Image: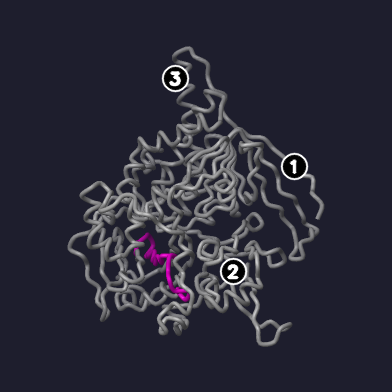
Amino acid sequence: MSHPERESMEVDVLFVGAGPATLASAYHLMKEVERHNEQAEANGQPQLEPPTVLVIEKAAGLGDHQLSGACMNPRAIRELIPDFEAQGFPTEVVCDDAQFMAFLPGGLAVKSPVVPPNFQKNGYHVISLSDVVKWLGEKCEAVGVEIYPGFAGDEILTEGDRVIGVRTGDMGIGADGKPKANYQPGMDIIAKVTVLGEGVRGSVTKQLISRFGLEGPNPATYETGIKEIWRVKPENHKPGRVIHGSEFPRFFSESHGVWLYDMGDNLVSYGFVTNLASENPNYDPHLNSQKFKTHPFMRKLLEGGELIRYGAKALPTGGLYSQPKLYCNGAMLVGDSANFCNAYRLAGVHMAIKSGMMAAETIVDGMLADDYSAKTLGAYTERYKASWAYEEHLEARNFTGSMEISPLFFMGINMPAMMLTGGRGVKDPLPTHASHKAMKKLWDLPPEQREKEEFVFDNVLTFSKEHLVGYSGTAHEADQIPHLHVADTDLCATTCAREYGNPCENFCPAAVYEMVPDTANPGQKKLFIHHENCVHCKTCDIADPYQIITWTTPQGGEGPDYTKM
């Protein structure tokens, strides 16, 4: 296809992704300019011209792609909007009963008499992140921010060593790679400063980090969270209850975590988090989450209930030492794109909001100096290191490194040491490894682990991936090039099948990847990609042992609908 003519537009500030980090940043930027101008007018000084600010979002509507555990520390939103509650912030309920539970052999569930410090959530707000993003979007538009849903950032635009904006994705290209009747080329959006807040493993963010060498000291690490919303019987619903927990002793061999948050309207948010640094190619985050629901505690909670929604999302867990450099000439990273999630506390929303606020304050510095080079944008890192967000990450800095050595080491030795030493522990820094590098070849596993586990879904409490995708609201046009790019499908059919048994069929929580009979080669299989099932969790991009799967943005507006998630 020849290069199409593309429209372009210029703005002062471009935000890529409409999540809590970018929307908080856009709102805070406009309010900071407003405050500066009020002070300047009072002092007889020149005022700043209000910037043109644009937020682009790949989802069809704000909040559609927002999935989170959503028990939010209110510290950051209170800084952003002090009277947020009076302004109608969509809190489901405020936690007043934080618990930690150990799920033991024999179907036992034991409530810990002492809640670990990292799970003390009393006073936190249980929220639907989808609803919060919608609310923040309204606040942004009220102060003059433009928001374009349905526009997916596809390519970073650079000029020399400087970011100058982003190109949005083409729309209307068929599966054969040719333009269809509704073809529309993407647009070049040129900006003085571009802020990337695409969430975990963002496509444009990956390009930026690679292009400018922004990698952190440790490689990024990840977990996949499976989330379901259930409407339970009224007698099983306890507003204000927040439970975190894990299965023991299984935790020590396969670290994972569980959350349960009671929301409004008899809804309960259930989540199961699986570490993607698994040695076993047969590990399956979806299966883990379904099996856990067969525990007697979960059966009792969900008995007579109704499944409402399903989703999945990868979580960045590397913490401080895996955070990339936060800026370069003309660009900054915020939220999960900058690995701001605190896995130790299983909390990321407040960190995302705070990162966006610090980025906004730095953009004001750029406006005052008329300079958006790294020299000026570096103040973002200075603000971060002086903030409570940095202190929070500092105390958790060796969490993932401890878990990689051994969950038992973390629980028994290094966690107490970290508490006593402000996060240092017995050694600082502890190294981490890219999640996909943990996977072992089948012949290196004990014989009993080499086969996929058989499990029968009852379609009442437990469900197959194919069934659950229907509860994610995901929608992709079938006639298009799959947005999941596999560099070498022959490798899937040969080397990967032999060495790992095609783990993509296991780790994907949406049944996107399937090895099907190859009619051209009897007795062999080939990879088929059900791209229409994709829930945008990014697990495949992370966990593929050969790193030949690249997740890219589909046509703007496509993907899951995580309303009320």
The residue indicated by pointer 3 is 39
Q: In front: 215, or 108?
A: 215
Which residues fall within the magenta stretch?
260-283
Q: In front: 273, or 38?
A: 273
SS at circle 1:
loop
Mark 1, residues whose alpha carbon is within 10 Å: few (<14), some, or many (≥20)? few
Establish if 359 lies above or below 450: above
N-term mark: 3 or 2: 3
Quarter holding residue 557? bottom right
Q: Determine if the magenta segment contains residue 270.
A: yes
Q: CA distance from mark 1 to mark 2?
A: 31 Å
Mark 3, residues whose alpha carbon is within 10 Å: few (<14), some, or many (≥20)? some
The residue indicated by pointer 2 is 533
Establish if 123 lies above or below 190: below
Residue 424 placed where, x, y %?
Answer: 28, 49
Q: CA distance from mark 3 to mark 2?
A: 52 Å
Q: Residue furthest left?
A: 113
Residue 332 placed where, x, y %?
Answer: 52, 40
Counting the numbered discs, the total is: 3
